[in-house]
Image (tube, rainbow, N blue to C red):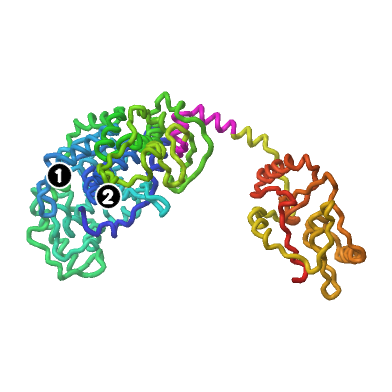
Amino acid sequence: MGIKGIYRELGPGRRVSLSKLAADSFETLDRPFRIAIDVAIWQFQAQAAQGGTNPATRTLFYRLVRLLGTPVQPIFVFDGPKKPAFKRNKRSGRGDGVATAQAKRLIRLFGFAIHDAPGEAEAECALLQKHGIVDAVLSEDVDTIMFGCTKTLRNWSAEGKSSKAPTHVSLYDVHDQSIASLGLGREGMVLVALMSGGDYLPDGIPGCGVKVACEAAKAGFGRSICRLKASDEAGMRAWKNSLIHELRTNEQGHFRTKHKALAVPDDFPSLEVLRYYTHPVVSQLSNLESVRQNLQRKHDLHLDALREFARETFGWDFRIGAVKFIRVLGQALLVHNMCQQQEDSQHYVKRISGRRQHFSTDATSELRMAYVPSEVVPIDLSKEVEETISSGRDGLALNSDVEFEAPSTAVDAGERLDAATGKTFDVTKPDLAWVLEGVARKSIPKAVQEWEEAKSGKAARKPPAKSKAGTRTKKTPALATTLSALRDRRLRANQKAEHNDETPGCISDIYAETIIHGHPREPLSSLLSQAQESPGKRRHQGQSQRSGFSPTPSPTRKKKLLVPRTSAAGFFGVVEVEAEERERKMPRETDSLKSSGVRARAVRWSDVSVIDLTGGD
């Protein structure tokens, strides 16, 4: 639809988050961002949806949920009876009446405004934007610019590969220098449609592409033809002769090259098609005030009826369907209630726990809030029956077109596992949602203020960080996995030390020292538990130990703990404690490590296997 290839000339537009546009509107205009939506384009795109029950309606449903959770105020515009009877040489009616009626029903259940245009929806949307009733038009059709829209949004889709949820739109503002320099405002776009072909005149000038038409628009031929009256035949002939002359000679240098082969038809331009673009069938100005009031009027969301719609249309039956309904609408309805500034918004928000600037909102500040989904979506789960499966003789389900994860007797219908986390989703327990900070400050200012005061007080009580010399190891390796795996593969020394059966010795006693080429080496176990000493001193002690080696038993009541260090001076330290104190000391040391950011724990020395890498093997 529209002009083929025009977006290669217009460019991709400016990608911007719809949430950012909404946040800017809250900040500057103190109201939601208002959008006129051409529903016909959405219905056309939804026909390509596949899978599940009623895929086209389901696609529209999820788009409406997304809009409900964004601080925008949409009005959905439908084609009217006076829409031109032809487009691209094809009859164009009002589409599938059943699909249109179902779409209108669903939109009204969500509490959104609906407007029936007298003619084409694109022209009506452009009219609403020109008169300030809406801020922008959301449509995939470039005809909105030809009808006078100055700010068009298209390609509402995900940004990035991490999510499929639509977050960003491509913004085309005719006042932007990138578009204004091309001469592709309303008058220029009309000329491009006449020359290269559009919905009403698909052929245009035979052989004339969109690039040549855009060059003519930049030269001002679109502005001059749109200012001529239809009755001014002499002026129309002069305009046509001027265009033909410039195409063949390129006298003024408006084109990259001469286009002598272009044969302009005798009936060009079609005054009928020109009038469709310049004077479309739209609402009278006297009726626009009622449209404005309809958009600004508060429309209630019909929750119970929407629940029945999902049950009938998507097969969201039984209690499991109700839980899915609550989960899908929870966050969106929370934001909607806050935008409506309902009195119970403060009750819905249990706490505020963080702030972020995320790419999905173009770094617009958001607050993380806890809420209970079943409170925000107050449908009565007690009225929902549990799912039952009728079976035949062979035990196969007869009335189901989906795969069950487990029999209904084994898994509660409301407690299916979350596919993302693997945990059971409970709609009666708090869930987390990110809400634009501007919306939160407007709807629940007291809660935001209390959270900021608590955060400031906590920061004031926090002692200043101590500066430490040297670099700190961010992560200390945990011992449990490595040491337990090595327990059955410990290396023994070449010489066996004598062992006292009556009094157990310390762990270093089970390793004997080996002398290689006359150079003594200390066991690794003794190095871990001793302070750093000079090589000469260690050598002197080693020689004295070899002269009369005898294991020294551990103190009767002393036990050893191996504690990871938080500094750069080695990995672990040995702490001796009383036997009765050991079990109380271990959790305290572990908690101290966690508070220092070290992911490890204290362990008993008796549970550790030591590998002597200093001895000969």
Q: Identify the residue at image location x=26%, y=28%.
A: 293
| Crowd tier of the residue under label 2, counting other residues whose Cα lies within 10 Å: few below 14, some 14–19, many 20 or above | few
Q: Nearer the viewer, residue 236 or 389?
A: 389
> Can residue 174 be seen from the camera position used here?
no
Q: Identify the residue at image location x=39%, y=39%.
A: 22
Q: Secondary structure at mark 2?
A: loop
Q: Identify the residue at image location x=68%, y=44%.
A: 590
| Crowd tier of the residue under label 1, counting other residues whose Cα lies within 10 Å: few below 14, some 14–19, many 20 or above | few
Q: Amino acid at mark 2?
A: Gly
Q: CA distance from mark 1 to mark 2?
A: 23 Å
**Residue 314 at x, y percent in the picture:** 27, 40
Residue 358 magenta-drawn? no
Q: Identify the residue at image location x=71%, y=52%.
A: 607
| Mark 1 or mark 2, whichever is nearer to me | 2
| Figure quadrant of residue 297 | top left
Would you place residue 518 above or below residue 322 in this image?
below
**Residue 265 at x, y percent in the picture:** 9, 62
Q: Which mark is residue 51?
A: 2
Pick the quarter of the image with the C terminus.
bottom right
Q: Which residue is mark 1?
A: 95
Q: Please give left or right for residue 494 compared with residue 184 in the image.
A: right
Q: Main secondary structure of the magenta part?
A: helix
Would you place residue 122 above or below residue 213 in this image?
above
**Residue 457 at x, y percent in the picture:** 63, 32
> Can residue 594 be seen from the camera position used here?
yes
Q: Which residues are magenta?
A: 431-454
Q: Secondary structure at mark 1?
A: loop
Image label count: 2
**Residue 451 at x, y percent in the picture:** 55, 32
